[in-house]
Amino acid sequence: QPTKTAPTAATLATHDSAFMKACRREPVPHTPVWFMRQAGRSLPEYRKLREGTAMLESCMRPDLVTEITLQPVRRHGVDAAIYFSDIVVPLKAIGVDLDIKPGVGPVVAHPIRTRADLAQLRDLTPEDVHYVTEAMGMLTAELGSTPLIGFAGAPFTLASYLVEGGPSRNHENTKAMMYGDPELWGELLDRLAEITGAFLKVQIEAGASAVQLFDSWVGALAPADYRRSAMPASAKVFDMIAGYGVPRIHFGVGTGELLGLMGEAGADVVGVDWRVPLDEAARRVGPGKALQGNLDPAVLFAPTRAVETKTDEVLDAAKGLEGHIFNLGHGVLPNMDPDSLTRLVEYVHTRTAH
Ligand code: CP3
């Protein structure tokens, strides 16, 4: 049974925001909005600031992290900030030899294929990610009543990068280990759960008001395999932070068939991609959870009228939900027009104000 932990100052300051109310399934003044990948390449001010600094290096610089995290809040008026980082940062912090290659994604020097390779993974301590604590302190001071969302990659998605050595379409080495050596797989996922849980604790204690677990690639699994081979590790992560009482969001792509199980893993809010309408998603998830989503990001490339029509569809499907946080069904795309995102925030706020 997780021990109850006293609320942090940041949790108290953001308690009455629309975002936190929606997470708790309480009435809201308007539907809160934020965007996955809101901090990043769609913003010219981001590109300018990042010039000459590698992605992972920028994640370790509290001044840059703070500014990049605040940029979309200032520009779009979103209801929450998401901490600027990447899912591989905790792995880098414990000494895994990896890099983020522009246009490719995370690349791991020595992929994990055998038991001996597990030696690359040691426990994470707060000192390993002191820059996160520092940046979050600066951020919560600036953000005031606007919640800061912390995040981590879920064990399955992290394992996919570690086992494949980089981004993968079919996850063949990952599944070969999962099906062929369930004992080694179980140990790998358990270690990743420990690291992820420890990393989220650091973020909550440093001032994150909510956290999102990104299991971006877990939609590659059938429900029975998810339940057996991925869900226990994600459930462990959620258990490790349950005592804080901060909302826990659980998101993956192509996870229509897994939504019920992803809720069961321990989430308070289930993130939904654009493939399943929110009313149907609510039936799959069941009562007692808020939903987050789910406008197809590519809709933002259509004219404003079309964006509004598709947004109306999302809001109509969300009408009967216990709690709804508006988001895209996956991240902001690099070549999106930032003004279309600003207009979208305003449209959702106006349409749902009461
Ligand atoms: O959401 C936010 O605004 C916060 C920042 C954030 C980043 N990565 C910044 C980033 C978050 C939450 C992530 C999570 C992340 N990283 C995920 C899970 C979310 C998802 O999209 O499903 C995954 C799978 C990764 C791994 C990763 N890192 C990929 C696939 C890429 C893109 C590679 C590329 O260049 O096309 C990255 C790099 C990355 N992470 C960038 C940013 C802003 C781009 C790097 C740059 O600007 O040079």
Image (cartoon, helix red, strand yellow):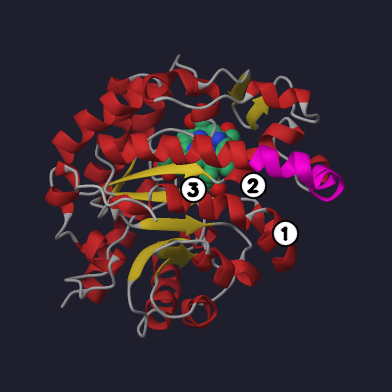
Q: Which portion, as a residue range, is magenta?
A: 175-189
Q: Amino acid at mark 3?
A: Val
Q: Residues within 10 Å of mark 2 (few under 14, many from 20)?
A: many
Q: Residues within 10 Å of mark 1 (few under 14, many from 20)?
A: some
Q: Which numbered disc, 3 or 1, marks the residue closer to the eye?
A: 3
Mark 3 lies within 8 Å of ligand 1 (Cβ measured): no
Q: Quadrant of residue 140?
A: top left
Residue under the image location 43 percent in, 47 percent down: 240
Residue closer to the observer: 38 or 178:
178
Q: Please state the horizontal and vertical placement of residue 85, each as a whole percent of the image.
A: 43, 33
Prevailing SS of the magenta stretch: helix
Give me the C-alpha separation between circle 3 and circle 2.
12 Å
Q: Which residue is mark 1?
A: 221
Q: Which residue is mark 2?
A: 156
Is residue 322 located in the magenta-colored stretch of the structure? no
Q: Amino acid at mark 1?
A: Leu
Q: Amino acid at mark 2?
A: Phe
Mark 1 element type: loop
Give me the C-alpha separation between circle 1 and circle 2.
10 Å
Residue closer to the observer: 53 or 320:
320
Residue under the image location 15 percent in, 78 percent down: 354
Going from N to C along the chain, the mark reached first, 1 or 2, is: 2
**Label of residue 237 in the image:** 3
Q: Which numbered disc, 3 or 2, marks the residue closer to the eye?
A: 3
